[in-house]
């Protein structure tokens, strides 16, 4: 193929502009990204060679090499991995990964630190080379292809790139960075060794660099009046040395690994710039043998709510890389977990289809799930209010002190996703229920304003036989809901649930530790023993007295309301809407419609407060029909909905006001 010029994808052009204007606050990250890409290419070759050993050609030892030329101002990262064809070079280096194209650009905020983190997360780390390079040349050949099928790709990081066919004897890829003047520090061995030790020490492949030694300067000729020697310097010896540990971190004993090394390894596999919240490293023995190194991130990734995104678990078999994002090893509701699983039992040629059926994989999945839940339970155990830690921290270990308050941080980032497990993982539902946290109507809750179901139950009033909750779109809407009025009056705590997943998740959980969960917006009002006989008698009398008005309201609202009844759950409001115990909530129906899904038409029950002036005014009013509809629509607005005919509602209100 003769030299061809191609335009970059529009998103790449925008990305390159950001990169060349110092998107990264820490320039040296480019080397971590390029070494990670080189390591991935070797992993892919190892995987493909399981079925075709000829791909190794005459070089079965996989490795990454760093070389530099100060005179030419170049730094080269070479791997003998899978390599690329010409079309693959055009596709992979000219476009952002398919999964990230639009998402990546939409997430850019202009904040250098957060935007830099996105580059690694969305798999576009190759372009980070332009931070230090004014031009990048890539020379590559696909494993198994003929030497004449090599490819050269060149770009100055502007609007286009060139591709041509070359002869390349070695398989794999060389990324040649033509360094900017201000980046020439990266063309020396001590700087490269320092960066590799900092970011890439845990790459399981050897990273090689040519040895250097000091050479004295040549003696100046005796007839030269100045005498002495020419300046000395470091010269390359022709021997290559390994500059990283080149052993998989998870295979080492825990006692030999520092916290900093664990954190650095997490950053390498996750492309995250921040340290993880916590991690667990274990060798599991028994009927199924495997090693797990699992991390919980400190921050939620940008694509957390993409349920199609695969889990962040890398699968190895006997230290041989098999696949990224092995979703069969972790349930969807724990998709934020990053890490490595290395199995001693799975076959090397395991496929994604086989993963779904394997008993060993199911055992690994269960083991990993339980381990993650154990980590969370340990964090939750130390999640105390500040006043609860006074006088206690002195007797805690440094490790336990570090855990105080960490669960609140985790829950703020991942709590809503964790709730998905209530409907997906029935075997661990009880454990998950204990990990849930909710806002509360009580002023006594002091751990980030959130409470567990267990703590709520411990505070229940004598005679209270249910855990009360309300769901709403926002915390303000939940706190100010008319359905809470009598609960506030009686000092009964209500859980305020405002995550969109709450309505769905609570369809699968009806009790906690033997105590039923009761929505305050479902079913007829009944506080049981918390309501005295006088109150019950007054409610019955009001219902009897109000029968004629209720009958007229039912007739006027027959197209909107399933029923109309008197209630004692209201104190200050004239009316509210509720649904039957087994009915779909109005909020859930709205959410389904907003998501483009079909939802049944919900006809709520209108409950009226017979003591309210507006309700009393109904009896005998010449505006009865309009007042009835206003009463219903106002209750709908208070509940978070919108009138079916907003114009008619406004017209009725205006007519009465005038």
Image (cartoon, helix red, strand yellow):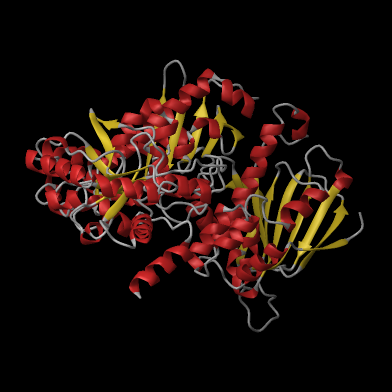
| Residue 226 on image: x %, y % | 63, 83
Image quadrant of residue 317? top right
Near-viewer residue (335 or 477): 477
| Residue 393 on image: x %, y % | 15, 48
- Residue beneath the point at 8% across and 38% down: 533
Q: Quadrant of the C terminus?
A: bottom left
Q: Quadrant of the N terminus?
A: bottom right
| Residue 53 on image: x %, y % | 74, 28
Q: Residue furthest right?
A: 2
Image quadrant of residue 374? top left
Res 445 seen here: no
Tell me: residue 358, above or below residue 8.
Answer: above
Q: How many marks?
A: 0
Image quadrant of residue 465? top left
Q: Residue furthest bottom?
A: 225
Res 539 seen here: yes
- Residue beneath the point at 54% across and 30% down: 328
Near-viewer residue (603 or 129): 603
- Residue beneath the point at 51% across and 68% down: 112
- Residue beneath the point at 38% across and 29% down: 370
């Amino acid at each position: 193929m003769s030299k061809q010029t191609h335009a970059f994808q529009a998103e790449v052009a925008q990305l390159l502009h950001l990169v060349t204007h110092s998107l990264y606050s820490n320039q040296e990250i480019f080397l971590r990204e390029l070494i990670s890409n080189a390591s991935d290419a070797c992993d892919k070759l190892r995987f493909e060679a399981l079925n075709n050993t000829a791909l190794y050609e005459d070089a079965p030892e996989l490795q990454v090499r760093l070389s530099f030329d100060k005179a030419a101002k170049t730094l080269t990262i070479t791997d003998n991995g899978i390599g690329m064809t010409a079309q693959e070079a055009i596709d992979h280096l000219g476009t952002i990964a398919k999964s990230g194209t639009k998402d990546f650009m939409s997430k850019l905020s202009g904040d250098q630190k957060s935007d830099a983190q996105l580059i690694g997360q969305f798999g576009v780390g190759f372009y980070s080379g332009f931070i230090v390079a004014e031009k990048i040349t890539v020379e590559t050949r696909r494993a198994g292809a003929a030497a004449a099928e090599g490819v050269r790709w060149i770009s100055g990081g502007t609007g286009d790139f060139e591709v041509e066919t070359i002869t390349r004897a070695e398989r794999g890829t060389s990324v040649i960075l033509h360094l900017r003047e201000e980046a020439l520090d990266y063309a020396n061995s001590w700087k490269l060794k320092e960066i590799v030790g900092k970011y890439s020490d845990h790459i399981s492949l050897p990273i090689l660099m040519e040895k250097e030694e000091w050479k004295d300067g040549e003696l100046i000729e005796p007839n030269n009046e100045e005498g002495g020697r020419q300046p000395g310097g470091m010269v390359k010896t022709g021997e290559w040395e390994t500059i990283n540990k080149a052993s998989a971190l998870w295979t080492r004993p825990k006692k030999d690994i520092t916290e900093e090394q664990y954190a650095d390894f997490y950053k390498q596999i996750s492309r995250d710039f921040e340290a993880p919240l916590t991690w667990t490293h274990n060798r599991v023995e028994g009927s199924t043998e495997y090693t797990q190194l699992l991390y919980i991130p400190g921050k939620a990734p940008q694509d957390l709510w993409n349920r199609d995104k695969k889990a962040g678990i890398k699968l190895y078999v006997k230290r041989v890389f098999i696949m990224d994002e092995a979703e069969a090893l972790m349930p969807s509701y724990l998709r934020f977990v990053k890490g490595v699983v290395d199995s001693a039992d799975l076959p090397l040629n395991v496929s994604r289809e086989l993963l779904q059926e394997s008993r060993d994989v199911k055992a690994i999945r269960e083991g990993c799930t339980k381990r993650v839940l154990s980590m969370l339970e340990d964090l939750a155990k130390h999640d105390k209010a500040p006043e609860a830690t006074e006088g206690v921290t002195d007797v805690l270990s440094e490790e336990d002190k570090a855990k105080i308050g960490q669960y609140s941080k985790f829950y703020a980032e991942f709590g809503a996703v964790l709730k998905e497990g209530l409907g997906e993982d029935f075997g661990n539902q009880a454990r998950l229920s204990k990990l849930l946290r909710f806002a509360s109507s009580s002023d006594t809750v002091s751990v980030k304003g959130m409470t567990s179901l267990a703590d709520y139950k411990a505070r229940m009033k004598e005679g209270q036989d249910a855990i009360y909750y309300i769901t709403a779109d926002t915390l303000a809407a939940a706190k100010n809901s008319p359905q809470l009025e009598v609960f506030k009056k009686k000092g009964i705590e209500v859980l305020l649930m405002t995550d969109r997943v709450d309505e769905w998740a609570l369809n699968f959980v009806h009790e906690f530790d033997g105590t039923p969960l009761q929505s305050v917006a479902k079913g007829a009002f009944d506080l049981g023993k918390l309501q005295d006989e006088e109150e019950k008698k007054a409610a019955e009398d009001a219902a009897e007295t109000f029968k004629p008005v209720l009958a007229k309201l039912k007739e006027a609202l027959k197209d909107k309301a399933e029923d109309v009844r008197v209630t004692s759950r209201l104190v200050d409001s004239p009316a509210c809407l509720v649904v039957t115990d087994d009915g779909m909530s109005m909020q859930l129906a709205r959410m389904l419609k907003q998501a483009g899904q079909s939802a049944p038409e919900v006809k709520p029950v209108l409950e009226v407060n017979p003591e309210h002036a507006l309700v009393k005014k109904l009896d005998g009013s010449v505006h009865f029909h309009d007042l009835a509809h206003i009463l219903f629509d106002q209750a709908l607005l208070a509940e978070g909905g919108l009138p079916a005919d907003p114009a008619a509602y406004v017209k009725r209100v205006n007519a009465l006001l005038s």
